[in-house]
Amino acid sequence: QVQLVESGGGSVQAGGSLRLSCAASGRTVSSYAMGWFRQAPGKEREFVIAISSSGDNTYYADNARGRFTISRDNAKNTVYLQMNSLKPEDTAVYYCAAARLLQGTYNSWGQGTQVTVSS
């Protein structure tokens, strides 16, 4: 089991940037693929972006392509989500999650961090 804690959320104007962090703890954290998901009010949770355990491969949803970047520092057991050119529709609670495979089932979740983008 992997424990995850997100941080870095906040309020920003459209066009701005934020960097979210996800601190992981537990056994063999570096062997897990890590992903970011988000859930806006009244909507279902959706996939945003993910990175393989080694950091060599990433997987993007259309909502992230060209604006969001994921990275990880396995020495620090931390995953980052750099969000640029933010839009009001990016407003959501952002969750960090872990899975055995990059496009596998994510079954360890953090508590989420709120991102609010104003126009």
Image: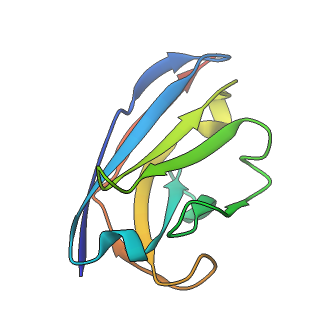
Quadrant in which the C terminus is drawn: top right
Specify the quadrant of the image occupied by residue 61.
bottom right
Quadrant in which the N terminus is drawn: bottom left
- Residue 75 position, x and y percent, is 32, 53
Q: Please give the name of the residue rendered at 47% of the width and 31% of the height, measured from the top-left corner.
A: 19
- On screen, residue 4 above or below 115: below
- Residue 37 position, x and y percent, is 52, 59
User: Between 83 and 100, which is closer to the camera in this rendering?
Assistant: 100
How many marks the image carries: the answer is 0
- Residue 97 position, x and y percent, is 42, 67
- On screen, residue 19 above or below 43: above
Kindly tell me whether residue 91 is visible in this rendering.
no
Specify the quadrant of the image occupied by residue 95.
bottom left
Scheme of colours in the image = rainbow
Kindly tell me whether residue 33 is visible in this rendering.
yes
User: Between 72 and 9, which is closer to the camera in this rendering?
Assistant: 72
Q: In the image, 104: left or right of 59?
A: left
Q: Please give the name of the residue rendered at 38% of the width and 33% of the height, measured from the top-left corner.
A: 9
Q: Please give the name of the residue rendered at 66% of the width and 37% of the height, measured from the top-left corner.
A: 89
User: Between 30 and 89, which is closer to the camera in this rendering?
Assistant: 30
User: Between 31 and 109, which is closer to the camera in this rendering?
Assistant: 31
- Residue 53 position, x and y percent, is 50, 70
Q: Please give the name of the residue rendered at 51% of the width and 57% of the height, measured from the top-left corner.
A: 36
- On screen, residue 106 above or below 22: below
Q: In the image, 108: left or right of 35?
A: left
